[in-house]
Image (cartoon, rainbow, N blue to C red):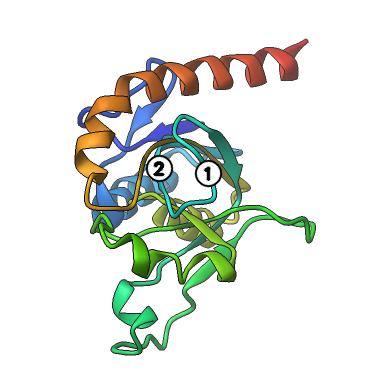
Amino acid sequence: MIVCAGNNETFSFATPMGVGLIEMSMNLTRLCLFDKPEFLLFVGSAGSYGTYRLLDVVESKTASNIELAFLQKKAYSPLDNVISTQTQQAKEAIVNSSNYISTDFALVQKFVPLGIELENMEFFAVLKVAQEFNIPAGGVFCVTNFCNERAHEDFLKYHEQAKAKLQLHVNQRIKALTS
């Protein structure tokens, strides 16, 4: 099953589940309780911490939920804050999730040495629900912005192009799998 956030980020091939960690968790849990999918693929936009460029398409099976205050040593969490459905030890981008969009580019640079290179509001929730229901899962993202003071402006500017690139990428992957 292919899922997406919703609102203005919808795709003809994906089921909208809600924006942010909470809506995604609630709605995806409900879906899994009543009609457990064999595989979950999340498709959506992402902000870059600097490694990836605008309109890059990135696949990942690893997400984190680390708030900026943690980087500033002003917060901690007793919870596991990194989750992966990846079975091999291959290097891949970790996608950080929060209900907030980061706009301090200097601060988010502290994520990069940790392997955390992208930001998407829902992906951690997707992987956490998938883990709870023992469902293989992953995500495909297209970079719409850098996480800086222009994040929202650039998101709006590149969002439609990113959605088109994601549509093409997913269609090509489906075609390759069914050929």
SS assignment at label 1: loop
Mark 2 and mark 1 in contact? Answer it, CB < 8 Å: yes
52 vs 86, nearest the viewer:
52
Percent position of residue 146, x then y: 37, 46
Q: Residue at x 26, y 42 (%)?
A: 18
Horizontal side, residue 173 vs residue 123: left or right:
right
Q: Position of residue 90 (x, y in %)?
A: 77, 55
* Residue 169 location, quadrant: top right
Label 2: element kind: strand
Q: Which of the two labelled residues, at mark 2 and mark 1, occupies the earlier sequence position?
A: 2
Tell me where residue 88 appears, x and y as whole percent: 79, 57
Residue type at mark 2: give it: Ala
Numbered label attached to residue 52: 1
Task: Indicate whether 78 appears above or below 166.
Answer: below
Q: In what quadrant of the picture does the C terminus appear?
A: top right
Location of residue 140 with respect to 60 vertically, above or below: above
- Residue bearing mark 2: 46
**Circle count:** 2
Quadrant in the rendering for residue 8: top left
Three-letter code for the amino acid on which mark 1 is drawn: Tyr
Image point (28%, 62%), residue name: 104
Residue 170's disc is none
| Residue drawn where x is 27% and y is 35% of the image | 155
Residues under labels 2 and 1: Cα distance?
10 Å
Near mark 1 (Cα within 10 A), the count class, few <14, some 14-19 or many ≥20, is some
Q: Is residue 142 above or below residue 14?
A: below
The label nearer to you, 2 versus 1, is: 1
User: x%, y% of residue 56?
Assistant: 52, 33
Circle 2 Cα neighbour tier, 10 Å, few/some/many (<14 / 14–19 / ≥20) = many
